[in-house]
Image (cartoon, rainbow, N blue to C red):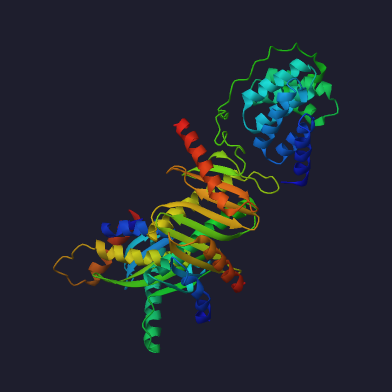
Amino acid sequence: MRAIEPWVLQPLRTFVDESSARLALLTTSSGQVVAQHGFHGALDLMSIAALGAGIVASSTEIAVQIGWTPFRVVAHQGRAQAHLLSWFDTPRGRWVALVVFGAETKLGLVQVFMEQLVRDLVAAIPPEAPEKREVLAADFERELNASLRALFGR
Amino acid sequence: MTDEIRALSAQYAADPSSLVFLRLGEVLRARGQPDAALKVVLQGLSRYPHLPEAHDLHARILVDRRDFAGAFDEWDMVLRLVPHHVGAHKGIGFLYYRAGELDRALYHLRAAAELDPEDAGLHAAVERVAGGGEIWDTPMPEAPVDRAPLPTAADHGTDLPFADLAGGSDGLLLVDQHGLRLGGGVRTLEGRDVSEQAAAALAGIAREASRAARLLAMGEWSHLSVECADVSACILNPTVDSTLLAVIDAGTPGGQLAFAADRAAKSARAWLERQR
Amino acid sequence: MSADLATLLDGLTRMRGVRGALLVSAEDGITVAGALLEEEQGPALAALAATLLARVRELIAETGHEPPRFLHLQSAEGLLLLAPAAGDLVVVSVAGREALIGPLRLEMLRIAEQLD
């Protein structure tokens, strides 16, 4: 399990332990990875993070078009495996969680502990530095590479 | 209880001096009820202390209960009564083989094979221990002075969980917090031992029960009763690091299930204390 | 349909000591219908009950016996009761220590039978 910022680790660890999730990924709404559990390849992670953010964005847009409140949770149920995508707001902006789980747990259980994860993350967020600097393209690429190194220990 | 056991039990109850206890003990043993079989054979031995077949049955039951030292003593007694008893030679041969004392094992297994030339399995066992069929060309050695084989690392002590209960460990399974069996056992209706699988499942149930009680703010859980069409079961924690499963027939009143489980838990706690 | 299912639970929720009753999907651990005194507890109750039932079913399956038809988890502060119905539904109720298990059990088995 790895995270860009250490305060994310304990809430995520508790979530994985309680929910028996096989894979867990936290990203910003733009697809930048915040933390992950169970992934082994940087390329897979980047693709999945981007796709997850895309699904949430599409699902939100569908709801807007229809005139509904955007869905916070999208679950895709397979025979042996399922995944759940959920967005939630934090003081650091909107984040997206992707969780992959199998028959050893239940969708309901994953949802219950997802709610707990959100509460724990919001409670654990340290105060943000007063100045936000504008993120330039070069800075973004540097930060992305730094985050990948942190996530995969390279 | 099967019809055969029921019928034999009735016969034995009607005439406790009869030798039907031998058949009843065999059937109980074959049905995976070593504790009930033990009770029956001990009752029979109290009336017939010099009956070789009773000692032989006793020895086999003790092997089922992994009391190998006790089994050796019983087969030793049989051979004192009947020096050419095939079952006793086979049994002692097996115990020596298990303990790695191959010369002694070979003597007894060969003696049994010579007494029962029709037993192909026994002949094959002799050749395996001897390392080949040439053994039959060599003269039979002199009988060794028998002593109980040294216990192996796999031997358990004779202090078993639930030994103090009237029904023994029938329908009882005690596991540690990691899902490893501590004592007792569970069999399917066909007699297949599923204790290890049940032990693993039991630890998971205990964890889920704890989590449910905690997250639903129900306080500490004390027991989980399960009712099926053909059995009832109770699951509880005798200690913080062990879990007990008690299974009874569906015909038993439900209110008795908790009593039976509590008695078993008390026995388990006492046993665990002795081990620590 | 949810209203009909919820109606099935009415009698159960009025019994002594019952704090809530749900119909739960055993597969997903999600509430199908029901009512609880503490509504926010609903999702957790459904999920935990379904998970506990799954574990017990695994154990009973290993022993080769018939599947469980009633579960009773006794705790210091109350009871959790489950009665699986045919298919995927489970009748779940949570009650305080003052509840009487005998009548509750009968009512839950009756409801489970109606769902079959």
Q: Where is residue A4? Give x, y as percent.
A: 28, 60
Is any atom of residue C42 visible in this view?
yes
Q: Nearer the viewer, residue C4 or B13?
A: B13
Residue at the image point whose x is 62% and y is 46% from the top: B194
Q: In this view, does B227 lie to the left or right of A18?
A: right
Q: Is residue C55 left or right of residue A125?
A: right
Q: Where is residue C41? Give x, y as percent.
A: 39, 67
Is any atom of residue B55 visible in this view?
no
Q: Quadrant of the C terminus of chain A?
A: bottom left
Q: Nearer the viewer, residue A114 or B253?
A: B253
Q: Quadrant of the N terminus of chain A?
A: bottom left
Residue at the image point whose x is 27% and y is 66% from the top: A122
Q: Where is residue A82? Give x, y as percent.
A: 49, 67
Q: Is residue B34 left or right of residue B264?
A: right
Vertical placement of residue A42 versus B40, above or below: below
Q: Which of B197 and C109 is in front in this view?
A: C109
